[in-house]
Amino acid sequence: MTSQTVLITAGAAGIGRAMAEAFAAGGADVWVTDIDDAALDTCPSDWRRSRVDVADPAAMAALFAEVETAWGGLDTLCANAGTAGETALIEEQDLAAFQRCLMVNLGGAMLAAQGALPLMKRAGRGCILFTSSTSGLYGIPYRSPYVAAKWAINGLMKTVAMEAGPFGIRANALAPGCVEGPRIEGVIAREAAAKGTTPETIRAAYMGGSSIHAFARPEDIAAMAVFLASPAGRHVSGQVVAIDGHTENPDPKV
């Protein structure tokens, strides 16, 4: 492999797309997966693209077999796929929906790590970046499926870092807070409905918990991913890195 190879799950839009663009701009060979065919179709032609449901073990195994055939190995995995889950009180959560949220966020991350680690161990190097959230650092009312999944991802990451470190593999978790884009707007709208208030009130409350009074952009998360996967981040492993500008629990007190 003559350049860095990077696989990004849910890489056709949002934070994943920004990661792919940032790595590609640095000369990396990029491979993105997604379940959104339309978004995949908009990706540059020099990116490898696959339609993969990260919660499907057989599809994930086939993906990494294809990666091995095409690239012979893998330098960086961005286990980025996730879903917001239901916005409701604990007693109103549907168990099947709760389990689906856990399977996509946590199960998908585990399956991605399982696929990448043998390739990285054989090479004696590698970097795994899990997309977590500041929801994995705080309790957030009405968001129990997502919060549970992101807390668990942080624990999974730390275990991967400990198990894989002796093989030259690092693992870290990126913890975005509020990131501009359709996903946070949907979260704000659903939270406002659940709490009987307005989206503007929720957005202002989130902003109020930020030391810089601004939401991050996908490019801000991507920049941290590129740093952690670079030689400059060679001694950073087992860490949850928040990219959110917050100094306290950002849950809106409304």
Image: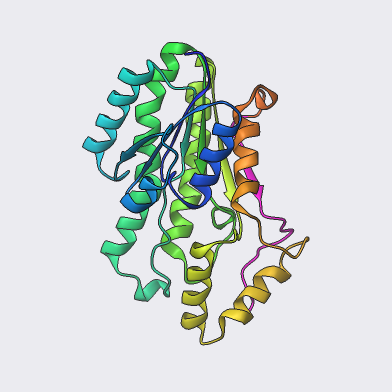
Residue 114: quarter of image: top left
243 horizontally vs 39: left or right: right
Which residue is rendered at x = 51% and y = 38% of the image?
Answer: 20
Residue 58: quarter of image: top left
Which residue is rendered at x = 66% and y = 61% of the image?
Answer: 215
State the residue in front, 27 or 122.
27
30 horizontally vs 213: left or right: left
Please tell me whether residue 58 is drawn above or below residue 212 in the rendered image. Answer: above
- Toward the left, the furthest residue is 58
Q: Quadrant of the C terminus?
A: bottom right
Where is residue 84 drawn, in percent x and y? 43, 61
Please tell me whether residue 202 is drawn above or below residue 48 in the rendered image. Answer: below
Q: Is residue 143 visible?
A: yes
**Color style of the picture:** rainbow
- Toward the right, the furthest residue is 211
Report the label total: 0
State the residue in front, 43 or 19.
43
Indicate yes or no whether the magenta region holds residue 247: yes
Look at the image and give the residue range highlighted in magenta. 237-253
- Toward the front, the furthest residue is 45
Q: Is residue 36 visible?
A: no
Residue 228: quarter of image: top right
Where is residue 207 drawn, in percent x and y? 69, 69
Where is residue 132 drawn, in percent x and y? 52, 48
Q: Main secondary structure of the magenta part?
A: loop
178 horizontally vs 154: left or right: right
Indicate yes or no whether the magenta region holds residue 134: no
